[in-house]
Image: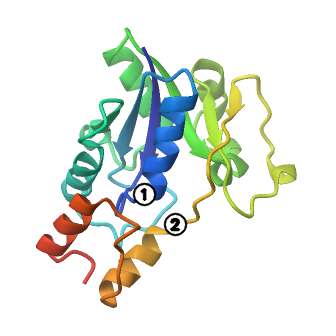
Amino acid sequence: MRIGLFFGSFNPIHIGHLVIADVMADQTDLGQVWFVVSPQNPFKSSKTLLHEFDRLKMVELAVSENFKFRASDVEFHMPKPSYTADTLAYLSDKHPEHEFVLIIGEDNLVHFHKWKNYAAILDNYGLYVYPRPQVDRSKIKVAHENIKYVESPMLDISATFIRDAIRNEHSVQYLLPENVADYIRFKKFYQ
């Protein structure tokens, strides 16, 4: 089976993530999309991150009703910070029956040439790229036959906006799956 790997901190997972994953699962040759919860992104600060198990739980709640989606904690058991190239190699070794593809936004493609072993990722796995607002495609330095652009809605939803809204007691009703919003309220996250 061809699996799309959607990496992120998912702090919290929101409808923007789910819409992109749904388009990838429905409109490409992917059999499943795995949401790989990253303990720590080497390019992001960890100050505002919830514990990785809490973020994984939110992803599990969000994807529980879609048989094409799966939550993955694979990077929890790997050295930190996590590098996508290492995770891809590990998953390929552990699941030789699957073929893996990386799902990224155009904003990440702009800086993709700075990623560890980016050329090997392109050659051995490939990228399914979704559009992002305000990305100048002329600044993208990577061109490769294994890069496939997939049209999807451009939902510019920010997890920072969601965390701030929760902290300020504003509604996030249409930004999060209901079970994720309930879990956040119950655990008093982001307050």
**Residue lying at 37% horizontally and 16% vertically, measured from the top left:** 93
**Which amino acid is tagged 1?**
Ile
Q: Where is residue 137 shown, x and y percent of the image? A: 82, 50
SS at mark 1? helix
The answer to whether residue 10 shows anywhere in this view is yes
The numbered disc on residue 97 is: none
Is 47 drawn above or below residue 177 in the view shown?
A: below
Q: In this view, does 112 lie above or below 92?
A: below
Q: Which of marks 2 and 1 is nearer the N terminus?
A: 1
Vertical placement of residue 16 versus 146, above or below: below
Closer to us: 142 or 168: 168
Q: Residue furthest bottom?
A: 168
Please tell me whether residue 148 is drawn above or below residue 130 in the rendered image: above
Q: How crowded is mark 1: few (under 14 residues within 10 Å), some or many (20 or more)?
A: some
Q: Is mark 2 on a helix, strand or loop?
A: loop
For this orientation, the residue located farthest to the left is: 186
Measure the alpha-carbon separation of dots 2 and 1: 8 Å
Q: Point out the image quarter for the N terminus.
A: top left
Foreground of the two, 20 or 120? 20
Reading the image, the residue beneath label 2 is 157
Identify the amino acid type marked 2.
Ile
Percent coordinates x, y for residue 186 in the rendering: 12, 72
Q: Which residue is drawn at 39% across and 50% down?
A: 81
| Mark 1, residue position | 15
Q: Are marks 2 and 1 in contact (CB under 8 Å)?
A: yes
**x then y, percent, for residue 176:** 35, 64
The residue sitting at 25% across, 84% down in the picture is 191
